[in-house]
Image: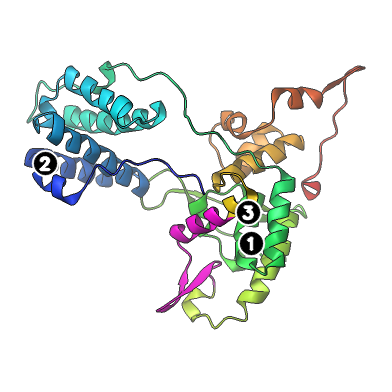
Amino acid sequence: MARKTVYNAIVNDIDWKEVNQDNKALLEEFIEYCESTDKSEGTVINYMSDIKICFIWNLKFNKNTFFVDFSKRDFMKYQNYLLNTLNLSPNRIRRLRSSLSSMANFIESMMDDKFENYRNQVNRIPVPNGDDVREKTVLTDEQVQKLLDHLVEKEEYQKACVFALAWSSGSRKSELLRFKPSYFVDENIIFGSLYKTPEKIKTKGRGRKLGKQLNKFILANKFKPYFDLWIEQRNKMDLPEELRDVLFVVKRKDGWQPVKISTLDSWSAQFSKLLEVDFYFHCLRHNFTTGLSQAGVPASVIKEIVGWENVAMVDIYDDQEVDDKLGKYFDENGIKKVESKTLEEL
């Protein structure tokens, strides 16, 4: 199956009705603050979900205490519950703590008129040791090509197209749905090898409404064959006018609609079965970065292509082993002269 974060279903409507009303009001005010400061939609959703888990625990095991009155021992007991009862990974616990800490900071800085002596106690509790328990999926180009060949053979051209778009651009899952068919014309190819979107699209970060606006770059030779197959098939569909420049579409009972994240998740599950590994679209972001690095593209250039603000992100997403990196530069004769590939060769 496609990789999923483990969420324990401890939040339900019945219990939520019994949660301390002051805590509910506090959460609503904190969420309103987040929206007013233009936090991303995903961040707001995560805050809401994470804090509700704490408030349900508080209802059941901590006398439904008002959050402002939580002691360090309360936070310690909650963390112990997450670690030893729910068996959450240390990384998951860090995120849950971070959400609580953000709300505590809001109380301390923005509600000091009501709670003058309040101080954030969350970060005074040591964080659990340990790394993420999930194993990272590293796909080879051979695995990718085998899957694409299978999808083409089955005439599942749209799935091949979305997979190839992630492979050839390193785009996040949500970003894949923002590309338009009109982007992929010859006049938008630069340096003979890269599509450059003619307009900036919303990516992760910098606000709930606008996000971080970036031009995206797509390796044309990896993407174009699958785009052409899908467009030829797509042009034969009786799509409504408002979907003419929507790249990925599905037919439902009430007609054609743009593909949503939930559809990509269902396709991810299919890709996992075909690849016989735990597939998630983000692993293609790693594959894209690794391919550029293997080809000798400087980290500073990879940073610009992907749209990162910090060049250190390249090392995080480069899945090459240390020995593979060293092998490019050293042999029995000492230091090798390395020839970089062109983008057309990637």
Query: Does residue 187 appear in this view?
Result: no
Q: Residues within 10 Å of mark 2 (few under 14, many from 20)?
A: many
Q: Reply above or below: 331 against 239.
A: above
Residue displayed at 40% across by 52% down: 210
Q: Is residue 124 above or below residue 229?
A: above
Q: In this view, does 323 lie to the left or right of 198?
A: right
Disc marking residue 19: 2
- Whether residue 272 sits left or right of residue 71 in the image: it is right
Q: Position of residue 124 (x, y in %)?
A: 26, 16
Q: Is mark 3 on a helix, strand or loop?
A: helix
Query: Label 1's element?
Result: helix
* Residue 161 numbered tag: 1
| Mark 3 vs 1, N-terminal side | 1
Is residue 221 rendered to the left or right of residue 333? left
Q: Of all residues shown, which one is farthest toward the bottom?
A: 238
Question: How far apart in space, not on screen, are marks 3 and 1 (Cα)?
Answer: 16 Å
Q: Which mark is residue 274?
A: 3
Looking at numbered disc 2 in the image, what kind of residue is underneath it? Val
Query: Between disc 2 and disc 1, whose residue precedes?
Result: 2
**Looking at the rendering, which quadrant does residue 179 occupy?**
bottom right
The alpha-carbon separation of the residues under discs 3 and 2 comes to 45 Å
Q: Which amino acid does label 3 sit on?
A: Leu
Q: 189 or 170: which is nearer to us?
A: 170
Total number of numbered labels?
Answer: 3
Residue pictured at 32% horizontal, 30% vertical: 98
In the depicted structure, whether residue 163 falls above or below residue 132: below
